[in-house]
Image (cartoon, rainbow, N blue to C red):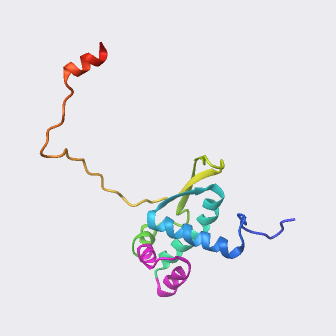
Amino acid sequence: MRHRMAGRPLGRNSSHRRALFRALVTSLFEHERIETTVPKAKEARSFAEKMITLAKQGDLPARRRALAFIRKESVVKSLFSDIGPRFANRNGGYTRCLRTRRRTGDGAEMAILELTELKAQVVTKAEPEKGKPAKKAKPEAAKAKAG
């Protein structure tokens, strides 16, 4: 019986599982979107939401608790300066898990784990390259291929 056994073992021992979640959460805050398997995404979601709640508190003890879990100091800095204030008016539900595909190697169900409020990205119109004009197809070559 599985009474009072929370969480998924994911075929790992406890230290390996903790290291896995630390790496997933660090990557999530670094890139704001990661692709992993569905069970890993569902488990990592709770750790990520706890870290965002710490970032919303914003005080020194919360920062130290986040540093004890997240691997990179630069990620903790961006978490507290950028991601935490972004979710200041939201009470939970900071991440979403979208099922995408089946992995070709082993058929595992994959999912995208992302923050619900992504950073606004500025889209600029690509300018054509200056200097050389665009090449046009020669009409004689097209006729030769068709005939």
Q: In what quadrant of the picture does the N terminus appear?
A: bottom right
Is residue 76 magenta-colored? yes
The percent coordinates of residue 100 (x first, y second) are 56, 47
Looking at the image, which residue is at 58% across and 57% down? 36
Task: Residue at the far right: name it.
Answer: 1
Is residue 39 magenta-colored? no
| Camera-nearest residue between 118 and 93 | 118
Looking at the image, which residue is at 72% across and 72% down? 13
Looking at the image, which residue is at 66% across and 58% down? 39
| Camera-nearest residue between 79 and 143 | 143
The percent coordinates of residue 96 (x first, y second) are 55, 57
Q: Main secondary structure of the magenta part?
A: helix
Numbered range of the magenta stretch? 59-80
Up the image or down, 12 lies above or below 74; here it is above
Up the image or down, 110 lies above or below 43; here it is above
Q: In what quadrant of the picture does the C terminus appear?
A: top left
The percent coordinates of residue 89 (x first, y second) are 46, 67
Q: Left or right: where does residue 88 sit relative to residue 91?
A: left
Q: Left or right: where does residue 46 sit relative to residue 77?
A: right
Up the image or down, 113 lies above or below 89; here it is above
The percent coordinates of residue 14 (x first, y second) are 70, 74
Q: How many marks?
A: 0
Task: Residue at the far bottom: name it.
Answer: 61
Q: Quadrant of residue 79?
A: bottom left
Task: Residue at the far top: name it.
Answer: 147
